[in-house]
Image (spheres, helix red, strand yellow):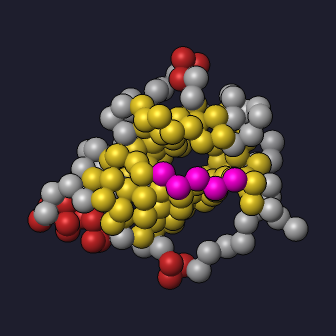
Amino acid sequence: MVQLVRRQELQVHVEYHSFALQESDDASLSVPYPDGSEFGKYLNVFPGRLDFYSAGHTHTAAVTVEVWDGPPAAWPEADWEEQEEAVVETAGGELAVWGMERADDIVLLGETGGLWRVRVGSAGRAAVERMTEDVGVVHGVERWLVQFWPGQA
């Protein structure tokens, strides 16, 4: 039976519609965040890095990160306004959270690097887009769920 290894609740500062999870030891990255970010692309994958495109310009997103020991159950599509799956390779198994600068939060995937499957879903996108235009900076309107599990070579 597939088990949840760890779960983290993060408050991520989004700027210019974007945030990222990338290798904690970013000296080894060929393309560190935000270099190469593609405006409007929901999930952009680089070696050791995942970029996320938010519907709101500047706000704080509620991001839940889960690490599983195998593929978690599929989600009901109605729960998410947008979702996508990908594979990312990490060198060290630790990802730092980035807005326009590095946050203090670290996501621990495992003791070593390797291939990781990732499933990303988000909700509150239409509301955060409208609110960041009409109200300004908002908190927790856009919600993200990012699930990781070991990938296959």
Q: Main secondary structure of the magenta part?
A: strand
The image shows residue 46, relative to residue 129, as above or below, that is above
Q: Nearer the viewer, residue 80 or 84?
A: 80
Q: Would you say 114 lies left or right of 12 here? A: right
Image location of residue 70, percent across then percent down:
80, 58
Point out the residue furthest to the left here: 134
Q: Would you say 125 lies left or right of 120 here? A: left
The image shows residue 62, relative to residue 52, as above or below, that is below
Quadrant where the image shows the C terminus: top right
Residue plotted at (67% across, 73% down): 74
Q: Nearer the viewer, residue 20 or 97?
A: 97
Residue 60 makes an appearance in the image: yes
Point out the residue furthest to the right here: 1
Residue 29 makes an appearance in the image: no
Residue plotted at (33% across, 35% down): 100
Q: Would you say 29 lies left or right of 142 here? A: right
Residues rendered magenta in the picture: 6-10
Image location of residue 112, percent across then percent down:
76, 32
| Magenta highlight on residue 8 | yes
Residue plotted at (33% across, 47% down): 14
Q: Quadrant of residue 16?
A: top left
Q: Nearer the viewer, residue 136 or 54?
A: 136
Q: Would you say 32 lies left or right of 54 here? A: right
Image location of residue 46, percent across then percent down:
54, 37
Residue plotted at (72% across, 72% down): 73
Q: Quadrant of residue 65?
A: bottom right
Image location of residue 58, percent across then percent down:
24, 50
| Magenta highlight on residue 125 | no
Point out the residue furthest to the top here: 27
Marks counted in the figure total: 0
The image shows residue 11, relative to residue 131, as above or below, that is above
